[in-house]
Image (cartoon, rainbow, N blue to C red):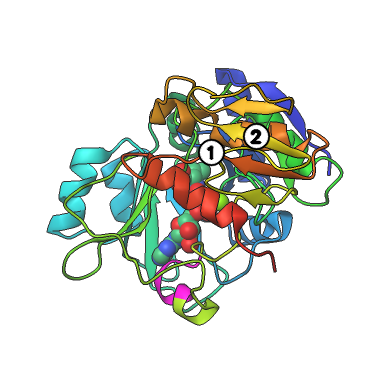
């Protein structure tokens, strides 16, 4: 697949819009992770996201919009979803709401999905891209399906070099600010439900604990198809809550090290700062995956704040692979 990587600039965004209009895919930075974007109103382009990523066809995509007005073109908002949008947008919160029109746009390869996931990203370049295109951009994380999400343009390049697909351009905006995907909240009827943890934790709402790594495909499709077992996975096996390394393991550390160990180490945050750890998580997994070790031992991460999302991603990265 022939794609280019350019620093993000106004000219680069203009070029990206031309490519999107022609049905191509463009990878772009958001505040969470890099997205693999297509024009939401071009069905063929959206279909090519699935083939380029190797994404299961039942898993719908998030629409990225630049204003509430644009969001309402695609989704139907109730009191709860409007309140959440007002509170968190632009920002790393995705709202799943009823879909406005089945004909107008495509975010899924399946006709059965009558809801749509929408967010306004808090990243200037992404907003400029959407504004110039004039319609929503559907974008999953810009990694091959099941693999580690990209937080740097070079990660996207690594994922798709030598692969076949429709990626035309990577806009390089440096390291993403947050480093972990958005919180997904379902606002259909009754109390909103958190489907995926992220950096923002609206404490008012319950997490849908019925979706675990053991959730069957059928159950998951009903709730949030992306919440399946193995995901975010490096090539090497992961061992969680490790106190030290065994054999030829690399160490994904959190906080100060008690002993000196002669193994490749990536420390997510020496100061035990969870935001810093979230920012570094995917880079750390990628670095250690290339260490030549036999596995990655991961030190315990506190189950609080964004630590909940970090542990969720780590459990999925450690889950049995299909
Ligand atoms: O931070 C993010 O959310 C990043 C950036 C690029 O915006 N995007 C991202 O997309 O993580 P993706 O495709 O990797 O994850 C989207 C999640 C999946 O778990 C998917 O199943 C869920 O959102 N989702 C999308 N549409 C849905 C819907 N209509 N109902 C329930 N879940 C939905
Ligand atoms: Mg993803």
For mark 1, what is the residue?
A: 299
Looking at the image, which is closer to me, 173 or 219? 219
Q: Is residue 222 magenta?
A: yes
Q: Residue at x 44, y 39 (%)?
A: 301
Neighbour tally class for label 2: few under 14, some 14-19, many 20 plus, Cα within 10 Å: many
Q: Residue at x 44, y 73 (%)?
A: 113
Q: Is residue 262 above or below residue 196?
A: above
Residue 254 on image: x %, y %:
50, 30
Q: Does dot 1 land on a helix, a strand or a loop?
A: loop
Q: Quadrant of the N terminus?
A: top right
Q: Residue at x 50, y 22 (%)?
A: 256
Q: Which mark is residue 251?
A: 2
- Is residue 40 among the parts visible in the rendering? no
- Report the residue that reaches farthest toward the bottom: 218
Residue 182 on image: x %, y %:
41, 45
Image quadrant where residue 247 sits: top right
What segment is highlighted magenta in the picture? 220-225
């Amino acid at each position: 697949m022939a794609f280019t990587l350019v620093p993000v600039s106004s000219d680069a965004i203009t070029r990206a819009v031309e490519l999107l209009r022609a049905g191509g895919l463009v990878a772009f930075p958001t505040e969470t992770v890099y997205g693999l974007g297509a024009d939401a109103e071009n069905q063929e382009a959206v279909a090519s996201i699935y083939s380029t990523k190797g994404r299961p066809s039942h898993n719908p995509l998030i629409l990225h919009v630049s204003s509430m007005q644009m969001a309402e073109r695609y989704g139907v908002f109730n009191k709860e979803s409007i309140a959440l949008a007002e509170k968190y947008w632009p920002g790393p919160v995705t709202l799943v709401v009823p879909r406005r029109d089945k004909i107008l746009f495509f975010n899924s390869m399946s006709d059965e999905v009558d809801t749509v996931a929408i967010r306004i990203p808090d990243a200037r370049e992404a907003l400029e891209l959407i504004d110039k295109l004039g319609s929503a951009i559907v974008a999953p994380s810009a990694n091959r399906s099941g693999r580690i999400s990209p937080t740097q343009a070079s990660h996207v390049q690594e994922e798709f070099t030598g692969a076949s697909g429709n990626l035309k351009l990577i806009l390089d905006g440096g390291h993403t600010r947050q480093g972990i995907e958005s919180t997904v909240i379902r606002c259909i009827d009754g109390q909103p439900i958190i489907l995926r943890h992220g950096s923002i934790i609206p404490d008012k709402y319950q997490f849908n604990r019925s979706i675990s790594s053991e959730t069957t495909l059928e159950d998951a499709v009903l709730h949030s198809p992306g919440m399946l077992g193995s995901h975010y996975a490096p090539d090497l096996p992961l061992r969680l809550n490790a106190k030290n390394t065994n054999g030829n393991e690399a160490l994904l550390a959190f906080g100060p090290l008690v002993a000196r160990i002669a193994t490749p180490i990536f420390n997510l945050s020496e100061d035990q700062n969870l935001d810093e750890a979230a920012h570094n998580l995917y880079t750390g997994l990628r670095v250690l995956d290339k260490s030549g070790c036999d596995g990655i031992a991961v030190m315990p991460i506190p189950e609080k704040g964004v630590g909940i999302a970090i542990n969720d991603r780590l459990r999925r990265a450690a889950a049995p692979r299909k």
